[in-house]
Image: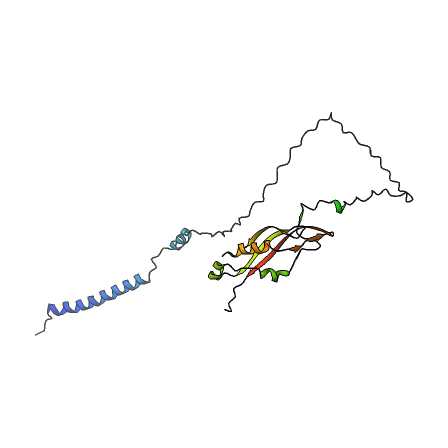
Amino acid sequence: MERHRRPDDSWKGNYLIRMEVSIIVVLALMIGLFNMDIRSKDSGEVMAASQETVQMEEIVQTKHEKEPPLPPRPQVPVEVPNDELVEEATLDLNTELNMDDKLAIPPPPKQANNDNSPDDEQIFVVVQTPPELIGGLRRLQQEIKYPELARQSGIEGRVYVQFVVDKQGRVQDPRVVRGIGGGCDQEALRVVQQAQFKPGLQRGHPVKVQYSMPIVFRLDRSS
């Protein structure tokens, strides 16, 4: 007996063949799609044209310069009337010089008589011969009686007394110009008022002279 094929066997064989063919077709389509250039040719040009070019301008830094001051306003001219006439003065100059003529030189001024000059009221600061203390400053210092207040307070220093030596050598108007206090200023005035001077001389004549003298106060620390 001839053996008949079953319908299932033929269907299975065709199915496999169809499956293989379908896979090959699908792979071919996919390969073709991947290789195909789907981009538009004009797209690159459009994108390039759409870009806007921006130019950077160089900024120049301006310098602030001080403006020069305005020139002064011109003076307004004042109109002078033409009616006024300026008289020209004529100068008579004798330009001839005669060497034989004597020059007319005025005589020198007469000097005042020093003997009759009133020097009694004038007080000199600098004279030709200054006053001289009779007995010297050391003897005058021995006349000082140290004030008890200054001794207890330990006050020492110099008291400067200014006065006028008159024409007889006497002391006038004594005053303290720099003192140290403690009773020393009054004691310095008392001692100076007792002083006697040889008067100062100006052109050989006694005059009043302003004079200054320091009186020294120093404690004896030996005891």
Q: Nearer the viewer, residue 20 or 209?
A: 209
Residue at figure coordinates x 63%, y 53% from the top left = 211
Residue at figure coordinates x 22%, y 65% from the top left = 22
Return the residue found at the far right: 100
129 vs 114: above or below: below
Q: How is the image coloured?
A: rainbow
Return the residue found at the far bottom: 1
Residue at figure coordinates x 40%, y 51% from the top left = 50
Residue 33 drawn at (x, y percent) = 30, 61
Q: Nearer the viewer, residue 3 or 160?
A: 160
Residue 43 drawn at (x, y percent) = 38, 54
Residue 179 visible in the shown view: no
Residue 26 drawn at (x, y percent) = 25, 63
Residue 50 visible in the shown view: yes
Return the residue found at the far top: 83
> How many labels were placed on the picture?
0
Residue 3: quarter of image: bottom left
Q: Does 23 sit left or right of 72 as displayed?
A: left
Residue 48: quarter of image: bottom left
Residue 145 drawn at (x, y percent) = 53, 59
Q: Does 128 sit left or right of 214 as displayed?
A: right
Q: Does 214 sit left or right of 6 as displayed?
A: right
Q: Nearer the viewer, residue 215 or 9?
A: 215
Query: Where's the N terminus, which quadrant?
Result: bottom left
